[in-house]
Image (tube, rainbow, N blue to C red):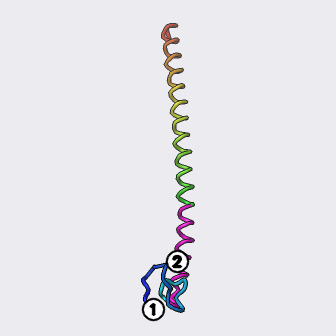
Amino acid sequence: MSWRFGARSEAAPPGSYGNYGYPNSGYSACEEENERLTESLRSKVTAIKSLSIEIGHEVKNQNKLLAEVDSQFDSTTGFLACLGY
């Protein structure tokens, strides 16, 4: 029986189902572990991305607040200068 590595349309040899042609090699277990670790990494990257977006929003808000405070200090400085202080 002829078959190709990874071909799904052709029958795999006996004893290799789920192991990609490597009978009893643990390849399937390694693939499952890789999938689990990949999903774990994906969720961590997603969490870090969300956190970095939130930090970006917070930085923009803080910069806006600092600009307002700076403007108020400039106004106060101008007012005090008019009073002779």
User: Mark 1 highlights which residue?
Assistant: 1
User: Mark 2 highlights which residue?
Assistant: 31
Camera-side residue of 59 and 30: 30
Q: In the rendered structure, which disc, 2 or 1, sits on the residue that comes first in sequence?
A: 1
- CA–CA distance between discs 2 and 1? 26 Å
The answer to if 15 sits in the magenta stretch is no
The part of the chain drawn in magenta is 23-42
Q: Where is residue 55 in the image (x, y as percent from the top left)?
A: 54, 44
Query: Which residue does the image show at 53% across and 46% down from the upper left?
Result: 53
Q: Residues within 10 Å of mark 2 (few under 14, many from 20)?
A: few
Q: Residues within 10 Å of mark 1 (few under 14, many from 20)?
A: few
> Magenta region, mostly helix, strand or loop?
helix
Q: Position of residue 23 (x, y in %)?
A: 51, 90
User: What residue type is disc 1 on?
Assistant: Met
For residue 39, which quarter of the picture? bottom right
User: What residue type is disc 2 on?
Assistant: Glu
Camera-side residue of 2 and 53: 2
Say if 32 sits above or below 15 in the image. above
Number of numbered tags placed on the structure image: 2
- Indicate left or right for 49 with 4 as reference: right
Camera-side residue of 58 and 21: 21
Query: Which residue does the image show at 55% across and 76% down from the upper left?
Result: 33
Q: In which quarter of the image is the N terminus?
A: bottom left
Q: What element carries label 1?
A: loop
Q: Where is residue 18 in the image (x, y as percent from the top left)?
A: 55, 83
Q: Where is residue 83 in the image (x, y as percent from the top left)?
A: 52, 7
Query: Which residue does the image show at 55% across and 56% down from the upper left?
Result: 46
Say if 78 sits above or below 49 in the image. above
Q: What element carries label 2?
A: helix
Say if 46 sits above or below 25 in the image. above
Camera-side residue of 17 and 53: 17
Query: Which residue does the image show at 52% across and 30% down from the upper left?
Result: 66
